[in-house]
Image (cartoon, helix red, strand yellow):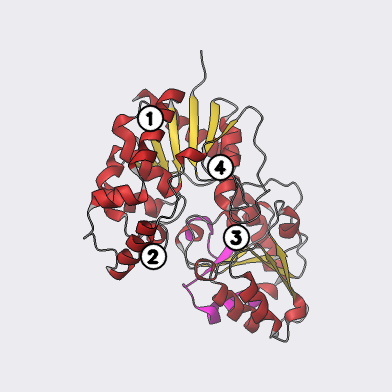
Amino acid sequence: MSKIHIAFLVNTIYGVGGVQRVLSSLANKLAENCDVSIVYIKKCSDSTESIIYNYDPKICLLHEERLDWTEISFIRRILTKINLWLKSRNIISIHLRNEVYYPKRIRNRLVKYINKKQFDCIIGVQGDATIILALLKKRLKSKCIGWLHNSFVAYFETAGRYYYGQRLMFKKYMHRMDQCIVLTKSDEMRCKDAFGCKTTNIYNPVTISTDKKSKNDNTVLFCGRLVKRQKGLDYLLEIIKKVMPVMPDWKFAIVGDGEDREWLENEIRQTSIADRVTFYGDQKDVIPYYLNAAIMALTSRWEGFGLVVTEAFEAGVPVVSFRTEGPSEIINDRVNGILVDNYDTDMFSKELISLMQDTERRHRMAYAAIERARDFSSDMIASQWYSLINEVIKT
């Protein structure tokens, strides 16, 4: 009996972002039972161009630049500005939106390419690959699954970000998809209500595995892209300024890179505790940094899931986070971490200091975090995906 042939359609496989880590982890697991291809349209990301996560040799990596729908044309820039001015009201013709965001010539190339490859199932990774498959669904021979990697609020209700201004397109076409995968239970309900599409919540798998656990050193870790707005770097700066003078024996480690790293480094340099805050940049192997931390701080304004939370748990590191959508479904408050009402930096700082001062409590939370990480094992999550893909192909 021949194996199921599945393909992932994705912008790029390069870089150290959460999407790239999760995709490689899931694809490698599915490749144990399926023929897996990754179709990507960009050779490298804007940063860390040479970094790519390890893929099983059985996986076919297909670079297809001619299918790139992401080129930012002059008209697309203008439409984006109009969307902001209109506050996402759906006044602009949906047909104009289709042509500007996903040009007809690219749509035609995609149809020809996908049908020629004869995939049993193709999975659009993130919102743009998902909606372009929905647009083409009636012309495709393959079953189609969308995989949304951020929260509904971030994708559709955050001005100037992601798919702000494209909500009407999703509402018009998403019902065509055979399934849509989202990362939280709350987004499962939102997508069903907003788009009327078949939607299932499957959490992301934890993407690291380590038998070693945190040494519980006096270090607070921040791990993520250094982008001020999404990752709440302004909140992180406030918290560092409030916490570090009170805890002189502790250090702060910041792992990650991004457009606002220079801003954050400059702000930290102006403080009296700059010598206790270290920037490590992007790291392909993040395990050593988790093992050297006692607590992780997550200050994001939004998180589609919060992959760093499950990674921290795998290493036995409790997490203090704002009560955003993804982390609120992963963290059991006061058990394996602490959830703080959104954007209250005073309370966040107090909770963080309290945990830093209580070694026994940290140990209890660390043990509970390790137990919770098992709920996100790659075997368990891949099994859910495999069952869903089989179900979709049979229908």
Mark-to-mark CA distance, 2 and 4: 25 Å
Are the residues flagged by discs 2 and 1 in contact, CB closer than 8 Å?
Answer: no
How many other residues sit within 10 Å of disc 1, few (<14), some (14-19) or many (≥20)? many
In the image, which is nearer the foreground, mark 3 or mark 1? 1
Instruction: Compare marks 2 and 4 and give the one earlier in the sequence.
Output: 4
Q: Looking at the image, which residue is at 36% across and 25% down?
A: 141
Q: Which residue is mark 4?
A: 23
Residue 329 colored in magenta in the image: yes
* Residue 371 place in picture, x, y as percent: 62, 50
Q: Looking at the image, which residue is at 57% across and 36% down?
A: 27
Q: Which residue is mark 1?
A: 143
Instruction: Compare marks 2 and 3 and give the one earlier in the sequence.
Output: 2
Label 4 amino acid?
A: Leu
Q: Quadrant of residue 85?
A: bottom left
Q: Looking at the image, which residue is at 41% across and 61% down?
A: 154
Tell me the magenta residue range: 328-354
Label 3 amino acid?
A: Asn
Are the residues flagged by discs 3 and 1 in contact, CB closer than 8 Å?
Answer: no
**Which residue extends farthest top?**
1
* Residue 332 place in picture, x, y as percent: 53, 59
Mark-to-mark CA distance, 4 and 3: 26 Å
Q: Which residue is mark 2?
A: 158
Instruction: Compare marks 4 and 1 and give the one earlier in the sequence.
Output: 4
Instruction: Compare marks 2 and 1 and give the one earlier in the sequence.
Output: 1
Residue 205 visible at all: no
Instruction: Compare marks 3 and 1 and give the one earlier in the sequence.
Output: 1
Q: Quadrant of residue 104?
A: top left
Q: Which mark is residue 336?
A: 3
Give left or right: position of 289 versus 67: right
